[in-house]
Image (spheres, rainbow, N blue to C red):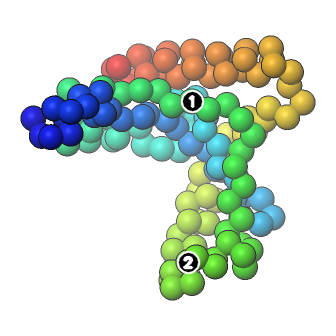
Amino acid sequence: MNRIEAYAPWAWTSHLKDMAVQEYEDGFLLSEVPLGEGFLDLRKMIATLPRAKPGLPLNLEMITRNPLKVPCLTKKYWITFENLPANVLAGTLALVRENAPRKPLPQTTGLNDEQRLSLEDDNVRKSFTYAEEHLGL
C-alpha cells in the first residue's frame, strides 16, 4: 500500500464511459453516450485496468448533455498548441471520420427537467445493461 492508498483508499478508482464523435463545420462534436454506443474499445480498457491495479473499482461516468464543441479547425483553438505537428490534427480528424456515430448524438436542448432526468436515467440503465451483458461487469 502506498501513501495515497493509506491516506485515501477511495482515491483508487476509474471512471468508465463511452464517447461518440461527429464532424461539424469548425471541427468535431464530442459526446458521452451509453456504454457500447460509442467508439471506445471498452473491452480492451476493461482488460488493461486490472493489470495496472488489481481490484480497481469502476464507476460509470454518464453525463447526458449537448455534445461539446471541439473547434479544432479555428485559429483561436490552436493558440495553446502552436508547436503541435499538423499530423496530430489530421490523425484526430481521421479518427472522427472513421467513427461517425450510428445515430444522432444526444441533445438536451428543448427538454424540460423531467425529460432530461428520464433521458439520463435511460442512459445509465442502458450502460449498466451493456456492462453486464458485454463486459462481464
Left or right? Give the position of 41 relative to 9.
Answer: right
- Give the residue displayed 73% in from the left and 15% down from the top: 118
Q: Given the current orientation, which residue lies at the most extreme left position?
A: 1
Label located before the other in sequence (2 or 1): 1
- Give the residue displayed 77% in from the left and 66% down from the top: 26
The kind of residue tagged 1 is Met
- Give residue 98's quadrant in the image: bottom right
User: x and y percent of residue 22 in the render?
Assistant: 69, 52
Viewer-side residue, 134 vs 58 = 58
Whether 130 is drawn above or below 44: the answer is above
- Give residue 131's quadrant in the image: top left
Does any portion of residue 56 appear in the rendered image? Answer: no
- Give the residue displayed 47% in from the left and 27% down from the top: 60
- Give the residue displayed 62% in from the left and 22% down from the top: 123
Whether 55 is drawn above or below 68: the answer is above
Name the quadrant of the C terminus. Answer: top left
Left or right? Give the position of 43 relative to 20.
Answer: left
The local crowd at label 2, few if under 14, some if 14 to 19, many if 20 or more residues have their Cα within 10 Å, is: few
The kind of residue tagged 2 is Phe
Left or right? Give the position of 127 relative to 93.
Answer: left
User: x and y percent of residue 120 in the render?
Assistant: 67, 21
Name the quadrant of the N terminus. Answer: top left
The local crowd at label 1, few if under 14, some if 14 to 19, many if 20 or more residues have their Cα within 10 Å, is: many
Q: Which residue is mark 2?
A: 81
User: x and y percent of residue 49 in the render?
Assistant: 26, 38
C-alpha separation, residue under disc 2 versus residue under disc 1 = 29 Å
Q: Secondary structure at mark 1?
A: loop
State how many labels appear. 2
Viewer-side residue, 34 vs 97 = 34
Q: Secondary structure at mark 2?
A: helix
Q: Say the numbered circle drawn on residue 62.
A: 1
